[in-house]
Amino acid sequence: MMSRSKPLAAFLLPLFCITSFIACGKKSGELPALTGATREAVLTEPPMVPARVNEDGPQKVVVHLEVREVVKPLTNGATYTYWTFGGCVPGKFIRVTEGDEVEFHLSNPSSSKMPHSIDLHAVSGPGGGAEASFTAPGHTSVFSFRATTPGIYVYHCAAAPVPMHIANGMYGLIFVESRSNPLPPVDHEYYIMQSEIYTTGHYGDTGLQEFSFDKGLAEQPTYVVFNGSVGSTLGPTALKAKVGETVRLFVGDAGPNLASNFHIIGQIFDNVYEEGGTNVNHDVSTTEIPVGGATIVEFKIRAPGTYHIVDHAIFRAFNQGAVADIVATGPEDSTVYSHQQRYENYQ
Amino acid sequence: MSHASFARSVAVLLAAAWFPLYAGAQPAHPPVHTGRAPAGMVSIPGGYYRPFYITKGIDSVKIEPFFMDVRAVTNKEFLNFVTANPQWSRSRVPASLAERGYLRQWKSDFVIGGVALENAPVVNVSWFAAHAYAAWVHKRLPTIAEWEYAALAPLRWAATPSRRSGTIDGEAKRELILAWYARPNGPLAPAGTVNENAYGVRDLFGEVWEWTQDFNSVIIPADPRGEANPSSTCGAGAIGTIDPGDYATFMRFAMRNSLLAAYTVDNLGFRCVAEDRN
Ligand SMILES: [Cu+2]
């Protein structure tokens, strides 16, 4: 998201070249030389995000990701057979830096029923890695790509039938951080993805729920959720912050069908990295995230309490599960928010 | 009631009615014996199969009558083959013909280790091994077209106290199959106890994937969002398939397409067919 106009690049060029020539020529197709160092990527389960890695220059980054077909809770009393990248939904968060060479190992254990693959939207190349990573149960595929372009990107399985693999949970985010212009430090970084689940049963039915092709095709989900299940990020697992702290959310929309009208009730985003690109908008209340897209939002917690993260297409939040919470602790400041001051008869 | 919701209701009812078969109970119907099929096989009448992926403009394949094994080949049967052909034992089979996981569910080269396992479909066999077995029993592996053609038949379901036996077809059958494909692997039921169809063939769905003779002949792209036939015009989606809504069939083609002939997989077995020369 930090790609620059040419004049700015020209201005900054000498500065970079003092230490290294890493960021030069990104848009011209030249790739910076690797430092020769190799590191194993640290992957995190939602809602956590790996820490930024400060290294001298572009490295080889080895990513090991295992596909897992698992039965997990969908909502109270209901379970679903999730197909996952790393055992969690969304899949594990991958963080690399612009220019890194990513050596990707996708493993499909022999206990799996299905072949799987991965298409990373951060890849420049046909299929985004899907063909190179198509893997039968009991096998591992290895392929490499250069993280040429900074941004926040969705990844997902692209094995047939693709909509079912995505609907069943095979998606996640990969963040390619700009080397020349990394995101400013914040107090908290979290990882959230919105998705729909299509079941033959109704919302709230108990027991193992089965995938509904009819509902998927009709784009009429049974559930709309954050981080894979109803209540994934509520109560004890709500996101946490303190008054005065800054929060950054990496937010993706896996679909498979519905774009998100992403909103936090009682919050205004100070910064929105629109569609994960180079435009940074300010003072936004609701931002749209397309299916297969992602964005970054930043905000400061100014008052204590519980903030509901919702899809503001509000039936989805009220009736289908699209709610996650941030619980903020700290001192009240009535100049920021007073709570109810009076309650009077009116007639 | 719409057609779709009706079919869904039927599917739910039938899935419930079908459960005893999933649980490994004996099917309600004995296999169909036409009188001329060899023991353990049934006759599949000839006809025409419309390929799922239409390539080179071929939209119909003639199927000659053939005999198909009623059930998947079991561990016990495969042990007979290995005993008679010890070059196919675990420790002697070359890596080029079978991966390291070959027959890994067995205790050792010539010991299966457990009656339940003996009667379960053999898995972790390479295509080469399945092919050699078929030749040894004077049969062969089915082609994709033959397998899919036989699999088009409606399924039978067992009678329960509250309903008569019957068949399940169309969307309801599709949902039943899809539900199994969407579940993680569990323990295998004894071969020949799952999902009998109208020909009397069992285990085609709900047990294991099965090798076919020409498993890798349909060159569909590993990235299925493109077209099936590289020479046809480009498009997104499942261009080139006759029914993009048939997810169960997509899964079988995806699975076949992910394989190489030496691969061994936990839920991949096989059955044989033979020519019907009558
Ligand atoms: Cu997948």
Image (cartoon, rainbow, N blue to C red):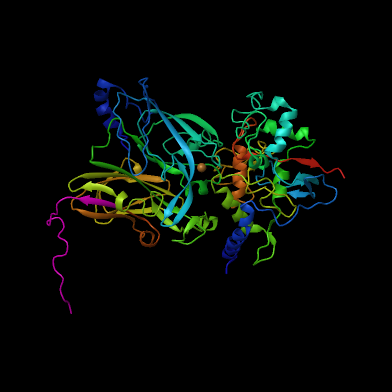
**Residue A54: which quarter of the image?**
top left
| Residue nearer the viewer, B37 or A35 | B37
**Residue A296: which quarter of the image?**
top left
| Residue nearer the viewer, A286 or B86 | B86
* Residue found 39% across the figure and 31% down from its top: A148
Residue B103, position as x, y percentages in the image: 63, 32
- A184 relative to A141 in the view: left or right: left
Residue range of the region highlighted in magenta in the rendering: A325-347
- A127 relative to A61 in the view: left or right: right
Q: Is residue A234 above or below residue B230?
A: below
* Residue found 65% across the figure and 23% down from its top: B94
Which quarter of the image is occupied by the N terminus of chain A?
Answer: top left
Residue A220, position as x, y percentages in the image: 47, 59
**Residue A332 belongs to magenta span:** yes
Residue A139, position as x, y percentages in the image: 54, 33
Prevailing secondary structure of the magenta residues: loop
| Residue nearer the viewer, A195 or B129 | B129
Q: Is residue A107 visible?
A: yes
